[in-house]
Image (cartoon, rainbow, N blue to C red):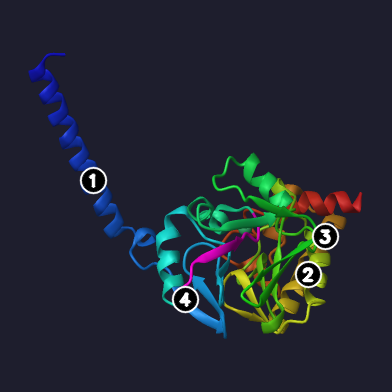
Amino acid sequence: MNLIIKNRFSQKITQICFVVTMMTAFAVFTSPTNAQNRLSIAEVKDGLHMITGPGGNIGVRITSEGVILIDDKFPQDFDEIQSLVASVSNLPVRYVINTHHHGDHSGSNAGFLPIAEVIAHKNARENMIRGNQDGLPRIVYSGETSVFLGGVEVQVYHLGRGHTNGDSVVYFPDLKTVHGGDLLHGTAPFIDYGNGGSSHGWVGTMNNILAIDFDTAIPGHGAVMNRRDVLNFRNQMEAVRERMTSLIRNGLEFDDAPDEIIDEGLSWTQAENGLFMQRSIPGFYEEISAEID
Ligand SMILES: [Zn+2]
């Protein structure tokens, strides 16, 4: 390549880069999911905040020796999470606890790993490896573990299968508050059968959550819950299981399940977020069919 062609070539590259940059800038300004300040933070209790916005709800536990995060949304949220944390504490994030492996809850792990320890259930880490996810936790646990920081204890429990096979429930005993990850969902849950999810396991796991002494619960998605909300969630899981069981006993075919499961008394079957109706029903039909056989 002679010099002139080379120069033209690099000129062309510069032009392309400029166009791409402008397109990216345009996308940033026009796409609501990439808009600045897409996340917000609010106090749940003294020393505990919640960051909301697209992706899983983040718990922000403030201590005198640093901050403990529960979940960390998507990769592109790292900077905004850091600035929101800085708005409520002048200390750094020291630990991130992932409630499970999904990318809207563990997406900023790679950003936090150079400055903090990331902790998850061992099955959640295995699910991340199988899914080729970045930011693998350096610390895993199986039954339960705790983080002690600045005079605060944060307890982490695996209470059984449910949303996945690696769900953690995080308990702040001094605040009588839990973060349930996607074991709790404000609209309708997703049973991730591909990663060990189970409606049968979920009922037992809900009973284990209800055995904890809490009055406030942060769900994976949606508004802060009280004990009654958590109880209602458990009851609806039992109710949809009973409905699917009786429909299958009465000859329900696989293809008819999405239409037939709809019931005006069961909000999940009428929810438009698709997590339950579109993504969970096929596996749910198979799970209940196998229980009946
Ligand atoms: Zn999830």
Q: For residue 144, what is the image quadrant?
A: bottom right
Measure the C-alpha gap from mark 3 to mark 2: 10 Å
The residue that label 1 is drawn on is 21
Name the mark on residue 40.
none
Give whichever of discs 1 and 2 has the lower sequence position: 1
Neighbor class of circle 2 (other Cα within 10 Å; few <14, some 14-19, many 20+) is many
Name the secondary structure under disc 1: helix
Measure the C-alpha gap from mark 1 to mark 4: 35 Å
Give whichever of discs 3 and 2 has the lower sequence position: 3
Give whichever of discs 1 and 4 has the lower sequence position: 1
Neighbor class of circle 3 (other Cα within 10 Å; few <14, some 14-19, many 20+) is some
Which quarter of the frame holds ligand 1? bottom right
Name the mark on residue 89.
4
Q: Give the x, y percent position of residue 61.
A: 58, 74
Q: Is residue 243 visible?
A: no
- Mark 2 belongs to which amino acid? Met
The residue that label 3 is drawn on is 200
Name the mark on residue 206.
2
* Residue at the extreme left of the image, as rendered: 4
